[in-house]
Amino acid sequence: MEKPDPIHQFAVKPIISFGHMGGAEIALTQSGLFMLGAVALIVLAFMYATRTNSVIPNRVQSMLELTYDFVADTVRSSAGQDGMRFFPFVFSLFVFVLLLNLFGMVPFAFAATAHIIVTFALAALVIGTVIVYGFMKHGTHFLGLFVPSGVPKWLLPLMVAIEVISFLSRPISLSVRLFANILAGHIALKIFAWFIAALLASGAWAILAPLPLALVIALTALEFLVAVLQAYVFATLTAVYLNDAIHPGH
Amino acid sequence: MTGNGSRDGRDEGPASSAEGDLSRRLARLGSELEARRKPVEPPRSEPMTSSSEPSALGRAFRASTEFVAGVIAGGGLGWLIDKVAGTSPWGLIVFLLLGFAAGIYNVMRASGFLAPARGSGSPDR
């Protein structure tokens, strides 16, 4: 039995092509379609949930209110009360990433967050916001972020260089963490699922097939946990980085 | 979702006369909730230590990405400087080493080693 390609599921395929521009195809891909679907689902769910705005919430409204409270608490504890001005931003990112991760768990669906270009674009948006807002609010004082306190003078140039590199590494670690978790999870699921088929097709060894089956079931549960957890981690780190833009001194 | 229809019907009905009363009570509830909300603890500069990533695997993964990201950022910056200033290969060498240092620094920060040094600064400056 030939081994299937576990990476094949991540291939981006165009659905509607809008022609070519400079040799590159401009098309609506299934990745873009899933992102549009996520946005549409978020908008519809919130419009549906808040349409009555009753004091006693119905099920959907209650669920979304819990999400709101959860993210609001995260932002408050990471960035303080001032950070609440970025609450809509963090909340949008959280819900968007969460839905894309969960969409990826639907069989035959496409996991858009398993592509680093998607997660890096989101991370670059976060860091761009931090830089722009930091300079807008604090001017050159924002650069104090790169000057650690309590460091001997002769060590300062080295520490500033390290702080700058550390700051530059933030969008990389933010995007790599999300993308690698989703990618690795989907590849692991694919490979262990293939073990089942391979064992079933190999005569007497088929008796071992329930073992990878149990593993795949456990992995699926774990992947759901990872999908939610990584969205939460993304939102928390966004709030933590925004905190640097709001309070750059340390 | 099955209960929506009946609730809608009730909202349309005699509730409209009590609308002003309801909104006043809602405003009062809001202000009381605001007063009762526990005071905001000073913002953590620390990303997280244990609360948000329960598993050891999650923390290990977190630390490794922080480290690798530092090295990549340092190496990329050095390569860019070499490309612009033509100082190859010295920029790459120096900044790759600085990137290693930044990676270690990231890991220390992520694991809460530097918590007092960063957290104790005045929050509003």
Image (tube, grey):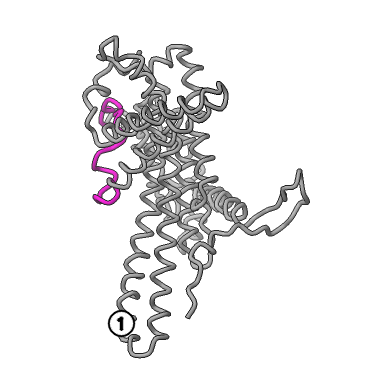
Q: Is residue A189 left or right of residue A17?
A: left
The crowd level at tag 1 (other Cα within 10 Å; few <14, some 14-19, many 20+) is few
- Residue A206 colored in magenta in the image: no
The C terminus of chain A sits in image quarter: top left
Q: Where is residue A60 in the image (x, y as percent from the top left)?
A: 45, 54
Residue B72 at least partly seen: yes
What's the residue at 74%, 55% (across, down)? Answer: A17
The amino acid sitting under disc 1 is Leu
Q: Is residue B78 left or right of residue B117?
A: right
Quadrant of residue A225 within the rendered picture: bottom left
Residue B13 at least partly seen: no
Q: Where is residue A89 in the image (x, y as percent from the top left)?
A: 49, 35
Query: Dot 1: what SS?
Result: helix
Quadrant of residue B34 within the rendered picture: top left
What's the residue at 31%, 28% (across, down)? Answer: B45
Is residue A71 or residue B58 the one in the foreground? B58
Chain part drawn in magenta: B37-59
Q: Main secondary structure of the magenta part?
A: loop
Which residue is most to the bottom? A204
Which residue is most to the right? A19
Is A220 above or below relative to B20? below
Q: Is residue B109 left or right of residue A140?
A: left
What's the residue at 42%, 33% (across, down)? Answer: A169
Is residue B91 or residue A61 the one in the foreground? B91
Is residue A50 or residue A69 the one in the foreground? A69
Q: Where is residue A222 in the image (x, y as percent from the top left)?
A: 33, 60
Instruction: Residue under label 1, please give it.
Output: A208
- Residue B52 colored in magenta in the image: yes
